[in-house]
Image (cartoon, grey):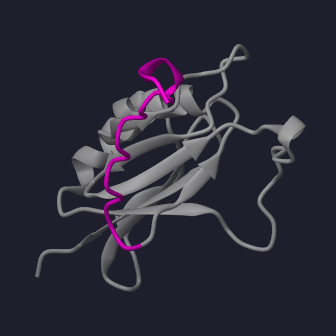
């Protein structure tokens, strides 16, 4: 086999952070990744280049010490966009400095679903919805 016959080498995949990685199929995964950078301080560590329709099959983000992965729907390959069924889809972000996380997300365009407040279990908690329809809960312990 000659060098001309060799397949191009893909860059190494970044290490997933955290013990469980949410993988979201969204309409506009690259746009969502850019929004998550602005709203949640996400860092894009890998993305498959978009196809001729602007869709990507994989984006890997780091958010607050964890991984979040995104993709677009590919109905022609058996992966249509489907509404979430049989569960509640909500990403839960925990941080000691929840006010700055909350405000950055609101300023970026997230809709407040439940205002950030002290809840009956003793933590400060609130819920937001991003422009892609994903719900984000934010939680912080109340200082004793």
Residue 7 sits inside the magenta stretch = yes
Residue drawn at x 41%, y 33% as measured from the top left: 9
- Extreme residue toward the top, this view: 52
Q: Eyeballing the image, is 113 above or below 103?
A: below
Question: Looking at the image, which is closer to me, 77 or 140?
Answer: 77
Q: Where is residue 86 in the image (x, y as percent from the top left)?
A: 79, 73
Q: Name the chief secondary structure element in magenta.
A: loop
Considering only vertical position in the picture, is 5 above or below 40?
above
Whether residue 101 can be seen here: yes
Q: Nearer the viewer, residue 33 or 2?
A: 2
Q: In this view, does 67 lie to the left or right of 134?
A: left
Figure quadrant of residue 115: bottom left
Position in image of residue 66 (x %, y %):
33, 59
* In the foreground, 81 or 125: 81
Instruction: Give whichever of 11, 97 is nearer the camera.
Output: 11
Q: Give the range drawn in magenta.
A: 1-19
Q: Does 77 appear in magenta?
A: no
Quadrant assignment for the C terminus:
bottom left
At a point 87% along the width and 47% down the height, the residue shown is 78
């Amino acid at each position: 086999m000659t060098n001309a016959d060799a397949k191009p080498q893909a860059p190494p995949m970044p290490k997933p952070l955290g013990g469980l990685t949410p993988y979201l199929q969204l309409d506009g995964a690259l746009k969502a990744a850019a929004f998550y950078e602005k709203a949640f301080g996400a860092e894009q560590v890998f993305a498959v280049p978009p196809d001729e329709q602007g869709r990507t099959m994989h984006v890997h983000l780091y958010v607050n010490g964890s991984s979040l992965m995104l993709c677009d729907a590919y109905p022609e390959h058996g992966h249509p966009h489907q509404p979430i069924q049989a569960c509640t889809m909500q990403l839960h972000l925990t941080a000691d400095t929840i006010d700055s996380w909350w405000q950055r997300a609101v300023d970026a365009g997230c809709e407040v679903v439940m205002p950030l407040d002290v809840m009956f279990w003793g933590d400060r908690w609130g819920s937001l919805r991003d422009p892609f329809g994903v719900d984000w809960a934010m939680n912080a312990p109340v200082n004793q």
